[in-house]
Amino acid sequence: MSSKPKPLEKILEEAIAAKKIIKVLYNGGSQPGAVRRVAPVQIDGNKIIAHCLSSKKQNEIFELDKLHYAGNVRESYNTDLDLPEGDCCICGKKFRKREAYMTYCKDCYIEKMRAEES
Ligand SMILES: [Zn+2]
């Protein structure tokens, strides 16, 4: 990779604007150092609010200085080949289950979380 790493805040702002899911390494919370998949919602000073798809928690608060960008989720799609396939119970699409308990696809999951907010 020849491009310079982007500052974390810029990455988060882009992810919020594009409703992207990113991977982050968080040196806090219940599992310090764990890589999580999050959908950032808002930056609030030194904190970011994000839906954590790894723990299925909405509006989790992460401290910015303990957070490290660990990549875009799309970049890891090749690892999905090892995951079991299922039918989404909402849209009916086939999707790779990142977690065994998942019954609907990532898109429906995000939709659902956003709908539950309001
Ligand atoms: Zn779906």
Image (tube, rainbow, N blue to C red):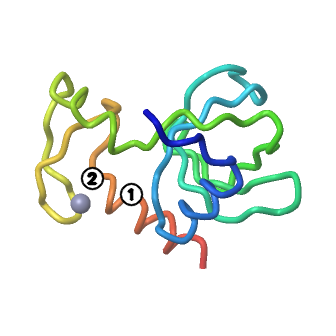
Q: Are marks 1 and 2 in contact (CB under 8 Å)?
A: yes
- Identify the residue under disc 2: 105
Q: Residue at x 63, y 63 (%)?
A: 13
Question: Going by the image, does 5 lie left or right of 105?
Answer: right
Q: Amino acid at mark 2?
A: Cys
Distance from mark 1 CB to nearest ligand 1 atom below 8 Å: yes
User: Please, which residue is most extreme toward the front here?
Assistant: 2
Report ligand 1 position as a quadrant: bottom left
Question: Where does residue 87 sit, x and y in percent of width and height?
Answer: 13, 49
Q: Which mark is residue 48?
A: none
Q: Nearer the viewer, residue 46 or 117?
A: 46
Task: Quadrant for the C terminus, please.
Answer: bottom right
- Identify the residue under disc 1: 109
Question: Where does residue 47 sit, x and y in percent of width and height?
Answer: 82, 52
Mark 1 residue crowding within 10 angstroms, few (<14) / some (14–19) / many (20+): some
Question: Where does residue 103 sit, x and y in percent of width and height?
Answer: 27, 46
